[in-house]
Amino acid sequence: MHFRDLGNALEWQANGETLRIEAWGPDAVRVRATPGGPVLDDLPGALLDAPPGGKPEIGIAEHHATLVNGALTVRVDADTDGSVTPYLPATAGRLTFLRTEDGAELLAEQPAHFWWPGPRSAAPTGNGYHRLEQRFRAYAGERLFGLGQHTHGMFDQKGAVVDLVQRNGEVTIPLLVSDRGYGLLWNSPAVGRVELAETGTRWVADSARQIDYWVTAGTPADVLRRYADATGHAPELPAWAAGFWQCKLRYRTQEELLEVAREYRRRGLPLSVIVCDFFHWTHLGEWRFDPAEWPDPAGMVRELDEMGVKLMVSVWPSVSPVSENYHPMSDRGLFIGSDYGPVAHADWPDKGLGAYSAQVAFYDSTNPEARRYVWERIRRGYHELGITVFWLDASEPELKPGHQTGLRYHAGPGPEVANLYPRENARMVHDGLRAADETEIISLNRSSWAGAQRYGAALWSGDIGTDFTTLRAQIKAGLNVMMSGIPWWTTDIGGFHGGDPDDPAYREVLVRWFQYGTFCPLFRLHGFRGPSQVLEPAMTGLPNEVWSYGDEVYPILVDHLRLRERLRPYVMEQMRAAAETGLPPMRPLFLEFPDDERAWEVDDAFLLGPDLLVAPVTAAGARERTVHLPAGARWTDAWTGQEHVGGQTVTVAAPIERIPLFVRDDARLPLHEEQA
């Protein structure tokens, strides 16, 4: 066993294992470990080239070594007690991450057993691949945030077991932020899981070649800044995207969609985006309008442009065998492949098939040639019409059955690389729009992975329920997305699966959800209203416009449409800050107030930017709400003008027409309409 000083990195080798700790931006390191042979440099991941930073200080002794990079110190212990007696394998090469300032332990590897295996273990799965495990010590009372978007209803992830896999509504972004003063990115797109138990933390890759993770030290805000530097900053959100997005499943024809946009204009209501959902195409995987239902899409886009409305179209990654693109793509190897021959990975209805489903394939988003091919079809079918906004639906991708065993991607075997898919799918649109000299780039995605923010990839929370329980879970999920480095996020306001516009109970859900959505990074109404239907090309839900919910609800929704319009300059300030610094527009209270112990526990309220505290109402019949006001600021009730000193909990009125809001210190926000 021995240590090596590589200048910017420290390397340790023993028993065939190679462990490298490398400075990777200020206050951060990248750790890679291979069970045999040298460190591999060409595996897919989230990290860009190392951000600029000073040269680390490396010190090597006989039985341990350290690497100091700003606020973070990493110690490598070669054996148990520093003696020259034979070491125990479980502690050989064990890493401890320390705060440089005072030597406090932030995180430490923990062996599974005193003899074997150690904190890192590798069980062969064949052909040079291994089931890889990385274990860390657990800390009593530690709070953990991030990991993408999940429906388990937890904000603090401590105690959760989370699958590292992409599913509808379950989005893997493996960044974990701790209240102990560190962040950790599991820099592997492999399918696996993370276990955040009281007895220890374990990261697992089911089949991969190398352990790879990144650690940084600092407050949660510091972590998000460093993460953006390491994985890429989001661009600035286009100004029009901060407005209201109208959507439903689905507008069946060009005239139906245009009439909705016209009605918004007739009523004098703000509208920024209207959405053309699935089955508008000729066949799945042809990426163009069906002329029978959309006879003049170029004219439609022109009329919408005259109203100041963008058209967003649904783009799916799946290709039906009756599509004109199927055989050319198959012949060129542009689909996700299979070890067993056939490329069909899901059954899906398509036009012209009657009651039957097609066995569809998926283009391989990890293949640059496949991305170029699909973009060229999108360019011809949509972009040449003036469409620049794309809804990348089912981008997990939505396989049947939903596992990666036996699948082959350009980037590698499915178990090792599958979580990359949604990010690379967003990259397809980003690179295509850049090549077309577009400067405003945004796509709306149902899934994501680390680094997707650099491609202008917004995320929405997938096909969710339509009740208060789901709304409560969405607030927590959205805050964890913010703690995962994705600043552009939205839900389907009102939920997706069902909801009766004539039901008073559902109308209350819709109102409270709309109030919450007013303060989300993206403000979008969508859903599949009414009873469930057979999945087929003619399907459509009930009306889902702001006037669809009755005379009592309508003025409440209109008031919030206008409130969002007044707040758009402030929202855009936060979007510029997100692009520049990595700090999200929607923030858990602790992000601004880390010294307030209670702020770490609040999972049902948030800050929009630094100055506006938003407290959604999430219970049927509730007409008041208890709100924690963080210590270290003064808070003014936006509706009553009453001022409160921070560090206390207050109970305020919450009639159905308003959501509790508090303004920080001397901030001035246009929450009220100016009187004529």
Image (tube, rainbow, N blue to C red):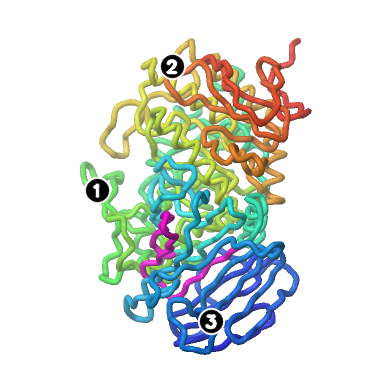
Quote the CA–CA distance across marks 3 and 2.
61 Å
Q: Earlier in the sequence, mark 3 or mark 2?
A: 3
Residue in view at x 56 percent, y 53 percent: 177
* Residue 614 highlighted magenta (yes or no): no
Q: Amino acid at mark 3?
A: Ala
Residues drawn in magenta = 190-215
Q: Residues within 10 Å of mark 3 (few under 14, many from 20)?
A: many
Residue 532: name its quadrant.
top left
**Mark 1 or 2: the one toward you:** 2
Front position in the image: 596 or 326:
596
Residue ID at (63%, 50%): 220
Q: Would you name the residue on which mark 2 appears?
A: 621
Q: Is residue 203 magenta?
A: yes
Label of residue 78 in the image:
3
Q: CA distance from mark 1 to mark 2?
A: 44 Å
Q: Residue at x 41, y 62 (%)?
A: 418
Q: Position of residue 643 (x, y in %)?
A: 71, 20
Q: Quadrant of residue 577?
A: top right
Q: Residue 63 location in percent, x, y? A: 58, 84
Q: Which of labels 3 and 1 is toward the front? A: 3
Q: Is residue 467 above or below residue 56?
A: above
Mark 2: give few (<14), some (14-19) or many (20+) Cα within 10 Å.
few
Answer whether labels 1 and 2 touch (C-beta < 8 Å): no
Q: Which badge, 1 or 2, is on the more N-terminal residue?
A: 1
Residue positioned 71% across, 62% down in the render: 101
User: Residue 126, percent across and down?
Assistant: 32, 79
Instruction: Name the disc covering residue 357, or none.
Output: 1
Which quarter of the image is occupied by the C terminus? top right
Q: Is 295 drawn above or below residue 135 in the view shown? A: above
Residue mark closest to the camera, 3 vs 2? 3
Query: How far apart in space, not on screen, are marks 3 and 1 (Cα)?
Result: 59 Å
- Secondary structure beneath label 2: loop
